[in-house]
Image: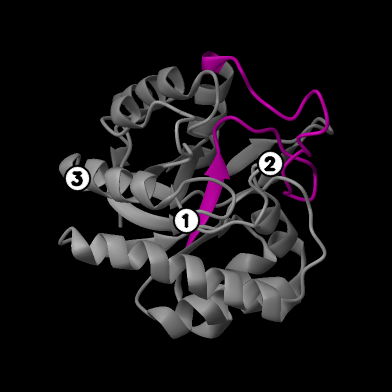
């Protein structure tokens, strides 16, 4: 039987501003990546999202990003490996405290947005992230883009890793995600997203924007919580994975 984790980026509201449908989506996912206050989220949102995840029996992960609230952490910044190490330790530590306070245990860490994509290609940044996670808690699982420098850095550091694929994003021939600045970056049709997910899990392949299949490893599938179709995608992907006799569970 095939097995896969279904994760979603959550806790991305801030103060009075609400983003996403966390309470509804948590019913259909198995792992929650919770923002830690740099790109989104705040202490109250972190606490509430941790409680919601525990109530829904979703495994909890820290979702550290660049300090860019206005850009939602999706703009590249000029940061050094030391900067990144410090940011990740700070954010993972903050969420870990909330998880502990609520009687839970953290499962993983998944970098967010520009930090994630920069580290996917930059060895220095990926090593800084892996080192930060290992130093905080060597038992945490590092979620990273399948086939990326981030996965390699995690393995080299001795961390358990989970190769992540995306339901709602298109791919380039080198295995990277199509930049959000391009019109063809996002998949908004649920049937297309489901078809891509099933192909990645069962066949270990994804169709890239250059017109051919490339190999990919799918341990965990991401749905973006701030997406317009996030709830529909979560419901339908969960349903179809089970219809294909794919076991949907966290690690």
Q: Residue at x 20, y 48 (%)?
A: 54
How would you rate the neighbour count of disc 2 (Cα within 10 Å): few for under 14, some for 14-19, many for 20 or more?
A: few
Q: Earlier in the sequence, mark 1 or mark 3?
A: 1
Dot in front, 1 or 3 = 1
Residue 17 left/right relative to 54: right
The residue wearing badge 3 is 57
Would residue 132 be visible to someone looking at this image?
yes
The residue wearing badge 2 is 70
- Asked if the magenta segment contains residue 164, the reply would be yes
Would residue 153 be visible to someone looking at this image?
no
The residue nearer to you, when weighing 82 against 230, is 82
Question: Residue 55: horizontal and vertical position, in percent?
Answer: 16, 42
Residue 189 left/right relative to 238: right
Residue 220 left/right relative to 100: right
Chain part drawn in magenta = 162-191
Q: Residue 36 carries which label?
A: 1
**Label 2: element kind:** loop
Residue farthest to the front? 16
**Callout 1 touching callout 3 (CB < 8 Å):** no
């Amino acid at each position: 039987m095939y097995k896969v984790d279904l994760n979603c980026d959550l806790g991305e509201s801030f103060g009075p501003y609400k983003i996403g449908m966390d309470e509804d989506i948590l019913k259909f996912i198995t792992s929650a990546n919770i923002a830690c206050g740099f790109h989104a989220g705040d202490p109250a949102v972190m606490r509430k999202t941790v409680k919601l995840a525990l109530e829904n029996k979703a495994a909890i992960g820290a979702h550290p990003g660049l300090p860019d609230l206005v850009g939602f952490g999706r703009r590249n910044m000029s940061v050094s490996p030391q900067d990144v190490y410090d940011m990740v330790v700070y954010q993972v530590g903050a969420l870990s405290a909330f998880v502990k306070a609520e009687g839970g245990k953290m499962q993983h860490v998944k970098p967010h947005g520009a930090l994630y994509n920069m580290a996917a290609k930059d060895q220095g940044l990926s090593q800084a992230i892996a080192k930060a996670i290992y130093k905080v808690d060597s038992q945490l699982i590092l979620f990273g883009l399948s086939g990326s420098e981030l996965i390699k850095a995690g393995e080299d550091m001795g961390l358990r890793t989970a190769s992540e694929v995306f339901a709602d994003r298109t791919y380039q021939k080198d295995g990277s995600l199509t930049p959000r600045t391009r019109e063809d970056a996002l998949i908004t049709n649920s049937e297309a997203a489901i078809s891509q997910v099933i192909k990645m899990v069962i066949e270990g392949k994804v169709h890239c924007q250059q017109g051919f299949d490339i190999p990919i490893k799918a341990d965990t599938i991401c749905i973006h919580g701030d997406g317009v179709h996030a709830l529909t995608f979560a419901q339908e992907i969960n349903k179809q994975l089970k219809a294909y006799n794919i076991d949907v569970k966290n690690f």
